[in-house]
Amino acid sequence: MNFRRIFLFSIPYIWLLALFLAPFLIVLKISLSDIALAIPPYTPTLDLSGGWVAFKDFFSQLDFENFTFLASDSLYWKSYLSSVQIACISTFICLMIGFPIAYGMANAPQEWQPTLMLLVILPFWTSFLIRVYSLIGILSQDGILNQFLLWLGIIGEPLVILNTNWAVYIGIVYTYCPFMILPIYATLTKLDASLLEAAEDLGCSRTSAFWQITVPLSKSGIIAGCFLVFIPALGEFVIPSLLGGSSTLMIGKVLFEEFFANRDWPVAGAVAVILLLILIIPIVLYQRNEQKMMEAKK
Amino acid sequence: MPETTPNPWNDPTAKPLIQFKNVTKRFGNFTAIEDLNIDIYEKEFFALLGPSGCGKTTMMRMLAGFETPTSGTILLDGQDISPIPPNKRSVNMMFQSYALFPHLTVFDNIAFGLKRSNMPKGQIADRVQEMLRLVQIEKFANRKPEQISGGQRQRVALARALAKAPKLLLLDEPLSALDKKLRQETQFELMDIQEKTGTTFVIVTHDQEEAMTVASRVAVMDHGKLKQVDTPDRIYEAPNSAYVADFIGEVNIIEGHSTTQRDTVSIAWAKGQPEIIGTLSKPGMDGNVTFLIRPEKIVISAEKPTDRRNTFQGKVVDIAYLGNLSTYYVQMPNGQMIKAQAANSRRRSSRPFTWEDTVWLSWTDTAGIILDR
Amino acid sequence: MRRFTWFNATSLTLGFAFLYIPMLIVIIYSFNESKLVTVWGGFSTKWYGELVQNEAFLDAALVTFKVGLVSSVIATILGTMAAYVLVRGGRFYGRTLFSGMIYAPLVMPEVITGLSLLLLFISIGLDRGIVTIILAHTTFSMCYVSVVVSSRLVSFDRSVEEAALDLGCTPFDAFRSVTLPIIAPAVISGWLLALTLSLDDLVIASFVAGPSATTLPIKVFSSVRLGVSPEINALSTILIGIVALGTVTASITTKRAVVRRRHEQQMAVQAG
């Protein structure tokens, strides 16, 4: 019994220690190292054969130089700021689009609901890359959207959407919308319909019942949805590199290029560490919201 | 229980099936069971009764093997069972939620334990059929648990727990999920099945009526301690504490000071009121006492009765009409409230007493119980 | 009563149009005769033919499939174990760290996961290839499996397991004959999720894949960077088709099962 428990517990534990925690510690260490023209391209490397002296020597060579570099080079803090900005704007647009969809689903006849759920989940199972790709053909200068708008006569000449931040917003909203819809839909279906009747009975108009009852009671779903969009959007790489332009600064893309194009591993490590530090805030807030939801259930 | 069967708990030579010896169970700082001693005999239908959180479920889970005592020993047939894991104990349990395996049919649920007991395959089918007959659910053998009603599920759970013919069957609130009518019918069936199989049953319940109906003995528990262990009638008529009396049925509790004269006791309980006369339950009861009397043992009348010594005048302040009975809440001049019950033996008669009426309450010398305080 | 208003109908229509029109256009243009992706040149299936003959794509697809299959199976086993330990293991030393490591990869940006795993593989001298991709995919998808399975474990009545022990099962026997069949649907959906995540992953694979092993998403990404191509449209259509077929079949099967069960329950109530 006890042996079995230890066995059960230790395999996934060791796996995660080796392949999740250890790599992360390595990133932390490399972010404190210096770039070098060597393989691997950084220094110092830990050589345990040197004993305690080498160990101490190794630590004395680590410094925060890369972080000071990040702070001094405007490219980096601009990318962080612009990532946060893009993630915020996209999350807001997602909410504006996702809430009416979730609300419509919750109000739809009971027998439609499984199908509607399926329709929201289906894109999620479809390849992320393909969904982003499908936007390219629509948003490009001679794409379907421009052709359609020209045909309608709304615009005189094609809009430039692809390779701008607008395309990035559209891409994030398009791919992450299901993450916004599902939690909001979940809280809306749990909402007791008699509450709205009670509100109307007490003199609320239908619109004010929506704002006074429905919206406040779906708050936890809205918050959950926002974080579920915001957190992955912040570190997004595929969308800015396929839909965004050269002026689109997103930290995921910067990190990727820093690593592969510049081969500056220490700076890439520092970029990653700062990104994680920024992410901790929304993650902690999200966790707190989830906990509140759990307690409310009890 | 009928007098024809000897009561093993009164026989000092009888060997108990289960013995709790100084059992204590703690969960962190919380003491669920405190220094508990109890003997349960073979073929008993033993009820553990108490409010939720009193430790009765913990006792049962220790018998089943899901918890081990912090200190003390539990003996089954004279053998210490604490080192034996649940799957090796000749004890089976019927769970409150029934815990039927949702992916198996009724038949396979009942056969589940048998398949793990080296019983030959042919015999398993026979035994399952026997169990299905016993609890009258032969028709549903091939259904899944979700395809039968709550009452049928309860029977499957019982049959499954009985199939291995355990020495001891534990029932954790077995009827709590059923509605009242069905529950009452099932209580009698449970007693029937217990008698037929001759298995020792230990039932945990918070429903005093259920415990009184089914059990040969009832243990009343509170905060991890046994308050009283006795037959249902003794628990009701001779409770050993105000707690037990109050937990089982309704009771009036009057506090006073007693003086003994030969075999009667008089209790001074309020200034300006006649003393309550009672009979002595044990010698030397001078001092502060609690007098307990059940509402149905108090007679309510308009005139002062002359055939009994305990007569008190009061005013009706409330009446609860329960259909078969009415309970009158009568206030004594000192403010003490006394409940008296009267059977509504006649239909459509106008109520004999109404609010604000002055009435007489009376009872015989032996109607109440006197306890030390 | 909930009211389905015109506003609701409109937002649903527009919303689903937004979600589905881009994919529909990809599907339509995959049958376009013309090489020009924005001009309709008549119906043709020639791009599918070219796709089937494209060795590079086929090789990448094979690698992706192998990685997906192996990593999802390992991830399902590890993830189920982790879920069982988290939900049923009680308190143990390092539990907070353990649950933290289960949940962290779910919110970790892929670029960081990829970067850190690559640095690990380099520092231990493991050659990049199919093995490193499998290791990486297993690590993050086991966390998803674990979350899916543990939510099922939390919701099911623990006394069912106790009943199995009470009826003579050893703990392992109880897990095999009672717990596992009950959580099987969650384990299967966890496995499907792990498989999908693995087949779909671009960023992590870009970091840990070596020149010897390229996955389909990496291949697609590098050709998409150059713009829209009818071959990719054809490939997308096939992938969308597989997912749609799978999801719809699964939902119809479960719906049928629900209907059947409801019917049987009614019968039971009438009979009882």
Image (tube, helix red, strand yellow):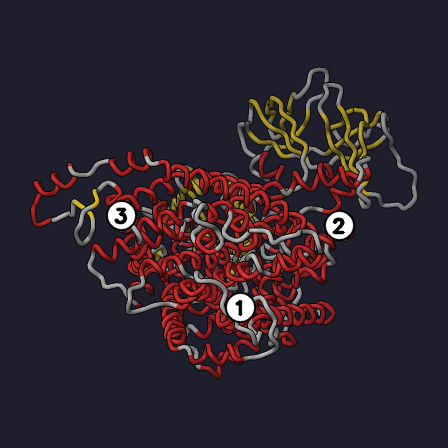
Residue C127 drawn at (x, y percent): 23, 64
Identify the amino acid type marked 3: Asp
Q: Residue at x 56, y 22 (%)?
A: B287
- The reply to the same-chain question for discs 3 and 1 is no
Residue B120 drawn at (x, y percent): 44, 81
Q: Is residue B168 above or below residue A26?
A: below
Q: Residue at x 46, y 46 (%)?
A: A248
* Few, some or many residues within 10 Å of mark 1 (<14, 14–19, 20+): many
Is C16 in front, or is C263?
C16
Label 2: chain? C
Q: What residue is disc 1 on?
A: B160
Identify the amino acid type marked 2: Phe
Q: What residue is disc 3 on?
A: A264
- Marks 3/2: CA–CA distance: 53 Å
The reply to whether residue B103 is in sight is no
Q: Residue at x 75, y 35 (%)?
A: B298
Mark seen at residue C7 = 2
- Marks 2/1: CA–CA distance: 55 Å
- Marks 3/1: CA–CA distance: 68 Å
Q: Secondary structure at mark 2?
A: helix
Is B12 in front, or is B350?
B350
